[in-house]
Image (cartoon, rainbow, N blue to C red):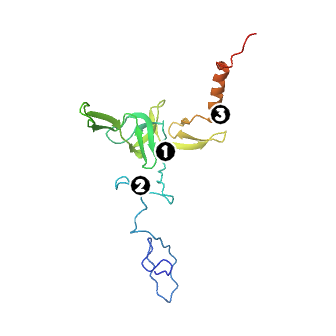
Amino acid sequence: MQSSFLGSGLRSSTQRCFAPSRVSPKACTVVAHYGGRVNLGGGKAWERTETNQNGKPVKVKMHVKKGDIVQVVSGKDKGTVAEVEKVISTRGMVVVKGVNITVRNVSPRSKDEQGQQKRQESPIHHSNVMHYSMSAGKRSRVGYKLTEDGRKVRYLVKTGEELPERSFKQPAAAAESSSSDSSAAEPPAGDAPSSA
């Protein structure tokens, strides 16, 4: 397929359209890219992530959020129940407390220091964990439903219990009310009422 606008060298990435000149050509999409590779971000070859049109990393849809109680379903720590400490949405991985501990050797920076071995949790793929119900002692998939209030909540499919909404940001209204309560309780030192 040749196009006067795109040049004769570009071809369709999905299919090739070969049609005799007497028959009308098939409609097909022409995608101009280099060597058929996915658009990747910069950095080292093993650190490259797929990027969108704006150059930002593509985020992976995950069923786990920070603060959820999960059970590891595969790997060397299979069966461990713990809390999710961190979610890495660009790689589709989670860091679970006490799971996948790796040892990192740290060399001394000066003559007086000694070398160390640091133990830290490494990320595991989100498909290797499932939500866990502490009350029922079962692991379950997560579902979504609407409450009577019209809120969309997450719940465990096996047990039916709702997962708590964990907000790690303090709402602005609550922050203002807590600061106004503390100021009302004790007046500033310079504005003390004088008894005359």
Q: Which mark is residue 49?
A: 2
Q: Position of residue 100 (x, y in %)?
A: 34, 38
| Residue occupied by mark 1 | 63
Q: Is residue 25 above or below residue 117?
A: below
Which secondary structure lies at badge 1? loop
- Please name the residue shown 34% across and 53% down the image: 46
- Please name the residue shown 25% across and 30% down the image: 112
| Image quadrant where one finds the C terminus | top right
**Given the image, on which type of amino acid does mark 3 rest?**
Ala
| Labels 2 and 1: the sequence-earlier one | 2
46 to the left or right of 149 = left
Q: Position of residue 25 (x, y in %)?
A: 51, 82
Gap between marks 2 and 1 measured at Cα: 20 Å
Q: Mark 2 near mark 1, Cβ–Cβ under 8 Å?
A: no
| Residue occupied by mark 3 | 173
| Labels 2 and 3: the sequence-earlier one | 2
Which secondary structure lies at badge 2? loop
Q: Position of residue 89 (x, y in %)?
A: 46, 47
Which secondary structure lies at badge 3? helix
Gap between marks 1 and 3 measured at Cα: 29 Å
Furthest residue to the left?
Answer: 111
- Please name the residue shown 40% across and 68% down the image: 36
| Image quadrant where one finds the N terminus | bottom left
Q: In this view, does 63 lie above or below 67?
A: below
Furthest residue to the right?
Answer: 196
Tell me which corner region of the image, top left, top right, bottom left or bottom right, holds residue 17.
bottom left
| Labels 1 and 3: the sequence-earlier one | 1
How crowded pointer 2 is (Cα within 10 Å; few <14, some 14-19, many 20+) is rated as many
**Given the image, on which type of amino acid does mark 1 rest?**
His
